[in-house]
Image (spheres, rainbow, N blue to C red):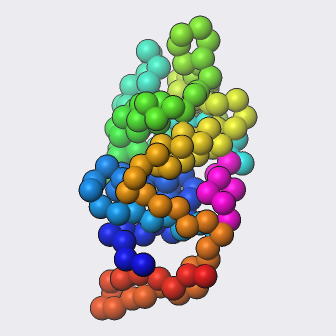
């Protein structure tokens, strides 16, 4: 089987990568050792920290994240996280992720070291909700195929480039 891209894993990371690749004209395969919605992602209960609330900014989110990490965080990585976070969450919403609301507004909570209310939840099943939205969207894409109940047993690497894998 020849594909342009092969993603190993159907958790949020694998589904997110597959979603980006699916927007191209390339063929995308997603290998998962069980069924696509049976990974550990569905058990993630916590919410998503994102500076989208009216009184919040990415600057505040950046500062809170550095404080929470005892100033040991990679500042470049934190900057990317807080700057790109709102756009990524909006993409999830456009794909159908349903986060908690009060009336017509999203219900942001304040948790841990956050100084602002910036945590979005989908009940106690935020991971499951995100996985559902991404998975449903990807399964509707003609250039994406899921290979369920498949285990990767070896990566095929040549000159430090992964060319594929052996899977059963």
Task: Give the main secondary structure of the magenta stretch.
Answer: loop
Residue 112's x, y, as percent? 64, 35
Q: Residue at x 51, y 31 (%)?
A: 96
Residue 92 visible in image: yes
Whether 117 is drawn above or below 87: the answer is above
Range of residues picked out in magenta: 34-42
Residue 131 belongs to magenta span: no
Quick one: which residue is furthest to the left in this view?
25
Q: Quadrant of residue 158?
A: bottom left
Residue drawn at (72%, 48%) of the image: 43
Return the x and y of residue 27 as percentages of the image width and height.
35, 63
Residue drawn at (54%, 18%), measured in percent from left and top? 106
Tell me if residue 40 can be seen.
no
> Residue 113's x, y, as percent?
59, 35
Whether residue 100 sits left or right of residue 138 in the image: it is right
User: In the image as oriented, which residue stretches furthest toward the bottom?
Assistant: 159
Q: Vertically, is 30 above or below 154?
A: above
**Nearer the observer, 145 or 39:** 145
Quarter occupied by the C terminus? bottom right
For the point 58% across and 27% down, the residue is: 99
Q: Residue furthest top?
A: 103
Q: Position of residue 50 (x, y in %)?
A: 47, 32
Q: Quadrant for residue 159, please give it.
A: bottom left
């Amino acid at each position: 089987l020849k594909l342009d891209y092969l993603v190993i894993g159907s958790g949020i990371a694998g589904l997110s990568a597959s979603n980006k690749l699916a927007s191209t004209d390339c063929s995308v395969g997603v290998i998962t050792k069980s069924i696509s919605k049976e990974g550990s992602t569905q058990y993630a209960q916590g919410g998503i920290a994102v500076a989208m609330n009216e009184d919040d900014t990415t600057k505040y989110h950046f500062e809170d994240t550095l404080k929470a990490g005892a100033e040991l965080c990679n500042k470049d990585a934190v900057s990317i996280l807080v700057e790109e976070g709102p756009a990524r969450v909006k993409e999830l919403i456009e794909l159908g992720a349903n986060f908690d609301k009060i009336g017509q507004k999203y219900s942001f909570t304040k948790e841990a070291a956050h100084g602002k209310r910036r945590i979005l939840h989908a009940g106690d099943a935020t991971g499951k909700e995100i996985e559902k939205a991404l998975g449903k969207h990807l399964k509707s894409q003609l250039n994406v195929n899921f290979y369920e109940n498949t285990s990767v047993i070896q990566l095929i690497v040549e000159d430090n480039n992964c060319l594929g894998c052996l899977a059963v």
